[in-house]
């Protein structure tokens, strides 16, 4: 196997593993009302900050 092939396979495996973790986290958050409130509150807070900076 060439070094480039090994590197590509390793990168593909890493990205796939990361996508699995993100999927599990999002499924857990959407399945729990308390986590959903905290997650949405953070996103709304970030959106408000962005809008305020854009207004200036």
Image: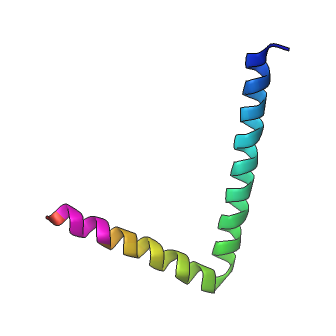
Specify start and end residues of the magenta stretch as a single range.
49-54
Q: Residue at x 71, y 34 (%)?
A: 11
Q: Residue furthest front?
A: 3
Image height check: is 35 above or below 8? below
Quadrant of the rendered structure where residue 35 is?
bottom right
Q: Residue at x 73, y 63 (%)?
A: 24
User: How far across and down, in percent of the image, does residue 26 sit?
Assistant: 65, 66
Horizontal side of 25 relative to 46 (left or right) equals right
User: How far across and down, in percent of the image, does residue 16 sit?
Assistant: 74, 43
User: How far across and down, in percent of the image, does residue 19 sit?
Assistant: 69, 50
Q: Residue furthest right?
A: 1
Horizontal side of 36 relative to 44 (left or right) equals right
Determine if the magenta segment contains residue 2: no
Camera-side residue of 4 and 38: 4
Image height check: is 34 above or below 28? below
Q: Residue at x 22, y 65 (%)?
A: 53
Horizontal side of 2 relative to 50 (left or right) equals right
Location of the C terminus (image quadrant): bottom left
Determine if the magenta segment contains residue 53: yes
Camera-side residue of 2 and 39: 2
User: How far across and down, in percent of the image, does residue 25 sit?
Assistant: 69, 66
Q: Residue at x 86, y 14 (%)?
A: 1
């Amino acid at each position: 196997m060439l070094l480039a092939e090994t590197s590509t396979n390793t990168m593909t495996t890493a990205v796939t593993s990361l996508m699995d973790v993100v999927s599990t986290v999002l499924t857990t958050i959407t399945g729990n009302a308390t986590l959903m409130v905290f997650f949405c509150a953070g996103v709304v807070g970030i959106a408000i900050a962005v809008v305020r900076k854009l207004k200036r």
